[in-house]
Image (cartoon, rainbow, N blue to C red):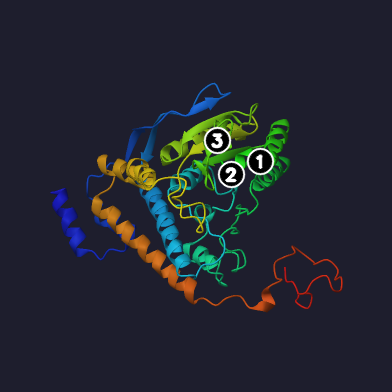
Amino acid sequence: MLTNISTVLRTCVQRNGTAAVASARSYADFTPQASFEIKKCDIHKLDEAPATEVVMTREEGLKYYRTMQTIRRMELKADQLYKQKIIRGFCHLYDGQEACAVGIEAGINLTDHLITAYRAHGYTLTRGGTVREIMAELTGRRGGIAKGKGGSMHMYTKNFYGGNGIVGAQVPLGAGVALACKYQGRNELCVSLYGDGAANQGQIFETYNMAALWKLPAIFICENNKYGMGTSVERASASTDYYKRGDFIPGLRVDGMDILCVREATKYAADHCRSGKGPILMELQTYRYHGHSMSDPGVSYRTRDEIQEVRSKSDPISMLKDRMLSNNMASVDELKEIDVSVRKEIEDAAQFATTDPEPPLDELCNHIFYKEPPMDVRGTNIWSKLKSIS
């Protein structure tokens, strides 16, 4: 009887995205939540690992699915616009690594802080940016999240500090944000992300030392996607146990392709920091489908078969989808509705990003200084005739 009612509602009600689908299926016997067994984390200088049996609600699952699909489709659209020469300059895509960004965000609060490197589109979205703002920033338009001046590598939102182009330089900045959290007495923390290629930077080890000395509420996360540009981790690092690199700092090695593994490990790390125990290090074992950047085809140092094997066995979106379907937490039709809704959102954003005007030249110097600009020194700046507005 309930199934018949649900069928009638689906055919009669005008649906609009996921919310309407859920409403139409409100009488269906979906499982509201389910328990899942996840892979155990490897640990370093910790007494116990995060839980391996976790609970996910239907609402959480749908939210995670939509967000990861949005990141995936957004990056594929960016690839298309780049090849059409509408997006220019550096552009590093995040498809394949969606479980990292969405899982981390599910384990912390929006009042916490996050800083990352130049593969930043996904984090800009999870931290509160919109697809329209991100796409418009990629095309250098006024409606971009950084007013069209930052481009792919420099996007910011509240409590999100980029988007940083210098390899590894965001990690000491993140420690500074964590110091501010502790100094101001707020129960907040800072997540600092970097890749396996940046993990050998000296400034990262200096930051570990200071963070441990001062017991900063800092989570250092190495997104190990197996390749630093075109160099495999085995050719670049004497030790590939990145979660142990902090030495005196506790560490976790996590399956970065499983959103639930990432979520639980992040919650564990956040609790560690908030309890006053100081910093903690996480290594997320993940994989990028595209090359290092859009100038890298991504197949000269790895085979197409390797990429396809990861897609077929470990894709984070497919993994979540299979879990939800096999536990009766969603229907195929419902997830297809989300896919259609996401594609439309991406297309609308791309249309905006290609029609919104570029910022005018007289705004070039705006938003450089927080308050008053320093005094003018004649001849040192070819744009000195332009005025800065804070």
Callout count: 3
Residue 375: tell me if it is visible: yes
Give the residue displayed 35% in from the left and 33% down from the top: 36
Mark 2 or mark 3, which has the lower sequence index?
Answer: 2
- Three-letter amino acid code of the residue under disc 3: Met
The kind of secondary structure element at disc 3 is strand
Q: Position of residue 106 (x, y in %)?
A: 48, 44
Q: Which residue is mark 3?
A: 282
User: Looking at the image, is mark 1 or mark 3 nearer the viewer?
Assistant: 1
User: Looking at the image, is mark 1 or mark 2 nearer the viewer?
Assistant: 1
The kind of secondary structure element at disc 1 is loop
- Three-letter amino acid code of the residue under disc 1: Gln
Q: Indicate whether 190 appears above or below 338.
A: above
Mark 1 or mark 3, which has the lower sequence index?
Answer: 1
Q: CA distance from mark 2 to mark 3?
A: 11 Å
Q: Which residue is mark 2?
A: 194
Q: CA distance from mark 1 to mark 3?
A: 17 Å
- Labels 1 and 2 touching (C-beta < 8 A): yes
Q: Which residue is mark 1?
A: 201
